[in-house]
Image (cartoon, helix red, strand yellow):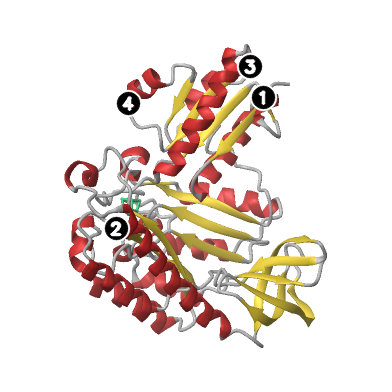
């Protein structure tokens, strides 16, 4: 039986794509190899959001080239965000790669795998729509909308992943049922801007309760409430302007949907936001946060920030720090700006903030993050929190709260269960505690 190995870089969307491709290859008769040394087919699933991720892929390609030159026999494919609509330049630079595949467009890899030799035809029927990844634990990611229409000036995603395309409601729900049947207890619905879900779907009458009859993210939340086995639903990443009151209301009202928002702000300064073409003002962003906290005072909110965007002055950066201190986020994902070839910013907005300044700004954001996360976590000392137990090791269990905080506690035999944990101590990054006497809230 031929073997494959997929090496995955980047975000949860890539991890979900890799699981789906793996399931497709297994349907064709391949088996998964633990490492690429034993593989007939090697796939690198790439990320282009940061230069560092691309550099790792280039480095691995160099290693594989040498192995080829030494006479090793394997097929090599590259998929994901490094692969745009045109591959001429990539083919010229990396002639030892056998196939290039854009995100979610697996067919070149299946061709390379030699589907005709294997006697299966994937071009007909419902091969991909009925091919779901096998979960690796009690949590799983489910892409619901691919691509992005927003075109922020710094971002390569719309050029690589294309326009927004929603998966049909029935297909998403079939995948969630499949995951539940394989032991998954928590699903995270994924999209680059996940609230865009449903805008491109036809009105087909099956979709839900919106006046126009079309499905939205809340429609999925409502349907997943009725799927046995699933006890939690999460969603990411949010886009402030797309977050409707209906979606906020569904998060507040539906028991399985976690009060956990990932709402990137990117900058705390209106001039920078405009140059980023983020499509909202600071006041509009803050209004969304207040609306969430108005319905759910204890909702966890994470955000993303880019420091050192072209032209960002000390004063503009100070506005970002002021925003982060004012809104007290649970988590802040900070990154220093780096040029991504092909974006508007790379062509038109010179990368003029010195590296040393970017590093200092990054440290300043990280200090605010540690401070706000500590403050939020300290409030939980002595409290009971609900934890979905994801794994156990060395006599202790690890899981997450509804807000996404990592929790460690001394107890075993609870993987997949909702446990109640009393918090004894905290760091900015995790909670430590002990199982309450009535340890299992629900055996699912
Ligand atoms: S919303 Fe902006 S940052 Fe997010 S994926 Fe789309 S273009 Fe990129």
> Callout 2: 10 Å neighbours few (<14), some, many (20+)?
many
> Alpha carbon of mark 3 to alpha carbon of mark 2: how far?
54 Å
Q: Which residue is mark 1?
A: 39
Estimate the x, y position of residue 123 in percent, counting from the top left. Answer: 50, 24
Q: Is residue 339 left or right of residue 395?
A: left
Q: Which residue is mark 4?
A: 86
Q: Which residue is mark 2?
A: 308
> Callout 3: 10 Å neighbours few (<14), some, many (20+)?
few
Q: Give residue 229's quadrant in the image.
A: bottom right
Q: Give the mark nearer the N terminus: 1 vs 3.
A: 1
Q: Is residue 440 left or right of residue 364?
A: right
The correct choice, above or below, for 89 with respect to 304 in the image is above
Q: Name the mark nearer the viewer: 3 or 2.
A: 2
The correct choice, above or below, for 399 with respect to 37 in the image is below
> Callout 1: 10 Å neighbours few (<14), some, many (20+)?
many
In this view, which residue lies farthest toward the front? 356
């Amino acid at each position: 039986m031929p073997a494959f190995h997929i090496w995955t870089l980047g975000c949860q969307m890539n991890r979900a794509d890799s699981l789906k491709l793996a399931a497709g290859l297994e349907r064709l008769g391949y088996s998964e190899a633990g490492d690429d040394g034993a593989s007939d087919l090697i796939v690198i699933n790439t990320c282009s959001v940061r230069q560092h991720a691309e550099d790792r892929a280039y480095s691995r390609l160099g290693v594989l080239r040498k192995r080829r030159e030494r006479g090793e026999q394997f097929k090599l494919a590259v998929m994901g965000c490094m692969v745009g609509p045109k591959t001429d330049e990539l083919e010229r630079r990396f002639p030892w790669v056998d196939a290039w595949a854009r995100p979610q467009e697996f067919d070149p890899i299946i061709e390379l795998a030699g589907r005709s030799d294997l006697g299966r035809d994937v071009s007909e029927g419902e091969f991909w729509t009925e091919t779901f990844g096998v979960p690796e634990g009690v949590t799983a990611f489910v892409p619901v909308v691919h691509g992005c229409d927003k075109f922020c000036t710094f971002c390569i995603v719309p050029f690589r992943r294309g326009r927004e395309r929603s998966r049909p409601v029935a297909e998403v729900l079939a995948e969630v049922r499949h995951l539940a049947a394989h032991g998954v207890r928590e699903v995270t619905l994924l999209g680059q801007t996940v609230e865009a879900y449903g805008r491109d779907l036809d009105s087909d009458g099956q979709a839900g309760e919106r006046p126009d009859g079309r499905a939205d993210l809340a429609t999925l939340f409502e349907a997943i409430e009725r799927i046995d086995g699933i006890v939690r639903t999460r969603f990411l990443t949010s886009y402030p302007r797309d977050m409707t009151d209906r979606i906020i209301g569904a998060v507040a009202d539906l028991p399985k949907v976690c009060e956990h928002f990932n709402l990137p702000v990117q900058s705390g300064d209106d001039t920078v936001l405009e140059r980023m073409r983020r499509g909202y003002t600071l006041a509009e962003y803050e209004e969304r946060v207040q609306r969430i906290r108005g319905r759910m005072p204890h909702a966890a909110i994470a955000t993303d920030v880019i420091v050192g965007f072209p032209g960002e002055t000390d004063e503009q950066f100070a506005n970002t720090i002021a925003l982060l201190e004012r809104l007290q986020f649970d988590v802040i994902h900070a990154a220093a700006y780096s040029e991504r070839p092909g974006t508007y910013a790379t062509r038109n907005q010179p990368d003029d903030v010195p590296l040393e300044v970017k590093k200092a700004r990054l440290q300043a954001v990280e200090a605010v993050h540690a401070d706000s996360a500590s403050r939020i976590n300290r409030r939980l000392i002595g409290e009971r929190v609900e934890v979905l137990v994801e794994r156990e090791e060395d006599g202790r269990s690890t899981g997450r709260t509804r807000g996404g905080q990592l929790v460690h506690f001394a107890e075993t035999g609870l993987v997949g269960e909702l446990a109640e944990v009393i918090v004894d101590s905290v760091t900015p990054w995790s909670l430590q505690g002990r199982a309450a006497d009535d340890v299992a809230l629900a055996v699912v």
